[in-house]
């Protein structure tokens, strides 16, 4: 992990206790035909804040809050700096059932079964994912078992990586502060892949895990209690998503996996094709807005006007 500030400040950020605000985690599903939930918000940084602090406090990952605040120093935003909180989301395409993990946007969506007389909901949290060569495969699976205070059995390749760095891992890491699985784990039908907590919460919103899906400690606990064994899980890797709100079409684009810096030119061809396919009769695309969306500011951008 790179720090542009002194080591003591980095350590303070990683170890400081956090009182997370989950106001943005659960939403009533929108009416049929609409795909957006939440609203973009703002806050003001205090002298001691980093973007990691503000992200965790508002249930956002590192990459999405950094993308929403270009030009702001992630480590020293500065007291009084206005910070955009990208707490508006386009729901992933496909069935709204069970868990959907979108690797590109580094976010998990859970669609719990609705109770009689209650509206359907979606719960969404930021995640940490594996490095580019250690991502879960795209496809469908299920939660096959759950465990509190799980032990970790590091695979051979992980132990070899640690050995090269002079760190010898045991064959089994017991529950506790040194266990990267955290306090809760959901085991998937894909062997070797889990949805779990973490002992390194700064990695949420980054591509630093060994391949599993990590959540903030304050997110995985409630999710663990709500998700039953057998819940379907769909893993997607969508570089952008489109969705409707009040008739208008919105676009949200994500950074390519393996490039947190987001400096490479963006190929507009798939975006143009997808927008054209979604146009309703009489709608006209706003290509300037689509270009702004591809700058990956972390928020949905309206790319059409409602049809008349």
Image (cartoon, helix red, strand yellow):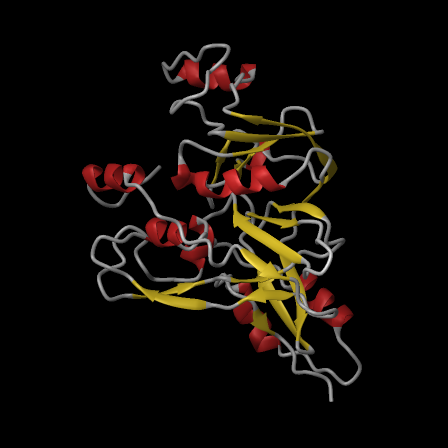
Q: Residue furthest bottom?
A: 308
Q: Give the residue drawn at x 43%, y 39%.
A: 203
Q: Is residue 225 above or below residue 29?
A: above
Q: Give the residue drawn at x 50%, y 46%.
A: 259
What is the x, y in percent for residue 215? 50, 40
In the foreground, 88 or 6:
88
What is the x, y in percent for residue 276? 74, 71
In the displayed structure, does residue 297 sit left or right of residue 241? left
What is the x, y in percent for residue 154? 52, 18
Give the quarter of the image for residue 157.
top right
Q: Give the residue drawn at x 57%, y 77%.
A: 288
In the foreground, 41 or 70:
41
What is the x, y in percent for residue 298? 50, 61
Can residue 204 be seen at all in this image of the molecule? yes
Q: Give the residue drawn at x 73%, y 49%.
A: 97
In the displayed structure, does residue 280 sit left or right of residue 16? right
Which of the image's four quarters has the C terminus? bottom right
In the foreground, 226 or 143:
226
Q: Is residue 148 above or below residue 271?
A: above
Q: Is residue 207 above or below residue 149?
A: below
Give the quarter of the image for residue 93.
bottom right
Which of the image's four quarters has the N terminus? top left
Q: Residue furthest right?
A: 281
In the foreground, 262 or 129:
129
Can residue 261 be seen at all in this image of the molecule? no
Query: Count the marks: how many?
Result: 0
């Amino acid at each position: 992990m790179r720090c542009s500030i002194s080591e003591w400040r980095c350590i303070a950020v990683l170890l400081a206790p956090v009182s997370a605000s989950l106001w943005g985690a659960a939403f009533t599903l929108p009416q049929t035909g609409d795909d957006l939930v939440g609203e973009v918000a703002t806050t003001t940084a205090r002298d001691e804040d980093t973007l990691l602090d503000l992200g965790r406090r508002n249930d956002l990952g590192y990459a999405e809050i950094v993308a929403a605040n270009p030009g702001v120093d992630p480590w020293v935003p500065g007291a009084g700096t206005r910070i955009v909180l990208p707490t508006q989301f386009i729901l992933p395409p496909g069935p709204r059932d069970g868990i959907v993990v979108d690797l590109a946007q580094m976010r998990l969506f859970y669609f719990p079964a609705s109770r009689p007389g209650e509206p359907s909901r979606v719960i969404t949290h930021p995640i940490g994912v594996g490095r580019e060569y250690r991502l879960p495969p795209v496809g469908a699976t299920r939660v096959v078992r759950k465990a509190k205070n799980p032990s970790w059995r590091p695979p051979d390749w992980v132990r070899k990586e640690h050995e090269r760095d002079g760190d010898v891992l045991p064959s089994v890491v017991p529950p506790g502060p040194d266990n990267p699985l955290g306090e809760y784990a959901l085991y998937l039908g894909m062997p070797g892949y889990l949805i779990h907590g973490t002992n390194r919460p700064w990695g949420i919103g980054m591509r630093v895990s060994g391949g599993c899906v990590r959540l903030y400690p304050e997110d995985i606990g409630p999710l663990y209690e709500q998700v039953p064994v057998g819940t379907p899980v769909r893993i997607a890797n969508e570089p952008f998503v489109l969705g409707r709100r009040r008739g208008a079409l919105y676009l949200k684009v994500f950074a390519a996996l393996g490039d947190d810096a987001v400096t490479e030119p963006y190929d507009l061809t798939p975006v143009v094709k997808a927008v054209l396919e979604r146009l309703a009769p009489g709608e006209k695309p706003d290509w300037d807005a689509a270009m702004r969306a591809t700058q990956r500011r972390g928020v949905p951008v309206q790319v059409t006007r409602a049809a008349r």
